[in-house]
Image (tube, rainbow, N blue to C red):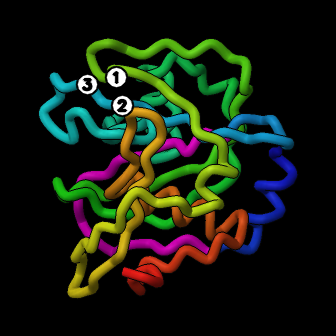
Amino acid sequence: MRDLLTKRLSGYVPRLLTLDYPEAGVLVPVTDNLDNPEIIFTLRSENLSTHRGQVSFPGGRRDPEDKSIAATALRETHEEIGLPPEQVQLIAPLSQVMSLHQILVTPYVGVVPGDHPLTANPAEIESIFRVPVEFFLEDKRHRTDPLNFLNNTFYVPCYRWDRYQIWGLSAVVLVDFLNAVYDAGIDLLEPPQGG
């Protein structure tokens, strides 16, 4: 899996946003099973002040002690789901995104062991779940949400997996990953055919 992701992302140029906002780093954890890779997501606790009860990638705000945004993503992933940094093979960053709370988020793709036990930090995470990449490549979206950002409208898919809805910022990062690695061709600038 590492070789595939490294090859596909080697020519990818992530979009950088020149905005002076607080920073955060998130990890897009892809399991190392080449035949059936999965992406790991979290459901945030209802007790949090922002994005409560929403599906997200593990990660969070940068601390002053963090040497880089990648270090932030790894530290927060360890804190939230118990995955140690040494278990993550970082591959490359994806395009930066802006959260509704004016946080500049840099996602990093990382390969993780599919069999490493994960434990949700109950103060931050309600649950951890995995979705096969194959499911997203079929683009069986539950709905499409028009989102406005910097005078543009983006048509962001919302995917339903079991009881979880993957939408908003997490879906934007997910689509960037799918397009960059798998040439999924999911266009955020045009509404999907048929509405």
Q: Which residue is mark 3?
A: 45
Helix, strand or loop at mark 3: loop
Q: Which mark is residue 43?
A: 2
Residue at (67% x, 32% y) in the render: 88
Give whichever of 19, 40 is nearer the camera: 40
Helix, strand or loop at mark 1: strand
Task: Check contact, mark 1 vs mark 3: CB within 8 A.
Answer: yes
Give whichever of 9, 187 is nearer the camera: 187
Residue at (65% x, 42% y) in the render: 132
Q: Which residues are magenta?
A: 13-30
Residue 111 versus residue 189 in the image, above or below? above
Residue type at numbered disc 3: Ser
Q: Is residue 7 left or right of residue 18?
A: right
Q: Is residue 162 left or right of residue 97?
A: right
Residue 153 versus residue 174 in the image, above or below? below
Residue at (72% x, 65% y) in the render: 182
**Where residue 175 sits in the image (x, y, percent)?**
52, 64
Q: Is residue 28 magenta?
A: yes
